[in-house]
Amino acid sequence: MSLNAALRLLAGSVILLSLALGTYMHPAWYYLTGFVGLNLLQSGFTKWCPAITAFRMLKLTEQSCDTGMSIHQGVRIIAGTGVLLTVAAFMFFAAPQWILYLTAAFGASLLQSAFTGWCPAFTIAGLIGFKKAA
């Protein structure tokens, strides 16, 4: 498994788990969802987050781009932004709870992309100019 696939697997799993815990246990779990979104967003720009450090220590293969930003970075930026916006809308701006279905869709898409190698964000990232990783 590649580093990028492992990161999507972890992020998608934690997003879905924290949404379930926030819905059925206590709304404070939504902060974990937001934290994952924030980490996805910043790792798209910096190529670093705590999970990436751990995955590098496990010697997972890393795909990178020679010039510009890779499509994997684009996926993290798109997913992180989507997760942050939907969770923030619900928590701070009184958006209806169904908005969290969009957050769950981002999480499920990241999770399944770890196994299939594709999610809608790959297509979007490619269309807006992110480069395929070598």
Image (cartoon, rainbow, N blue to C red):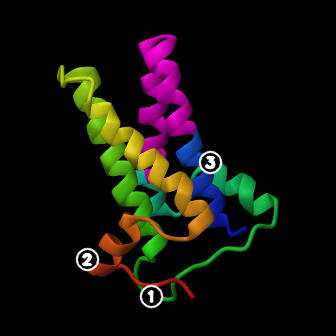
The residue that label 2 is drawn on is 128
* Residue 38 visible here: no
| 88 shown above or below 129 | above
Q: In this image, 76 relative to 127: left or right?
A: right
Magenta residue check for 25: yes
Separation of residues labelled 3 and 2 (CA atoms): 25 Å
User: Residue 91, percent across and down?
Assistant: 29, 22
Residue at horizontal 39%, vertical 50%? Answer: 80
User: Helix or strand or loop: what does disc 1 sit on?
Assistant: loop
Range covered by the magenta-colored residues: 14-40
Q: Characterize the local packing of mark 3: few (<14), some (14-19) or many (20 or more) Cα atoms within 10 angstroms.
A: some
Q: Outermost residue, right direction?
A: 58
The residue that label 1 is drawn on is 67
Q: Is residue 40 above or below residue 44?
A: above
Residue 122's image quarter?
A: bottom left
**In the drawing, what numbered circle is on residue 10?**
3
**Mark 1 burial class by Cα count in 10 Å: few <14, some 14-19, many 20+:** few
Q: Nearer the viewer, mark 2 or mark 1?
A: 2
The span from disc 1 to disc 3 (Cα, nearest Å) is 27 Å
Q: Viewer-proximal residue, 114 or 82?
A: 114
Which quadrant holds residue 99? top left
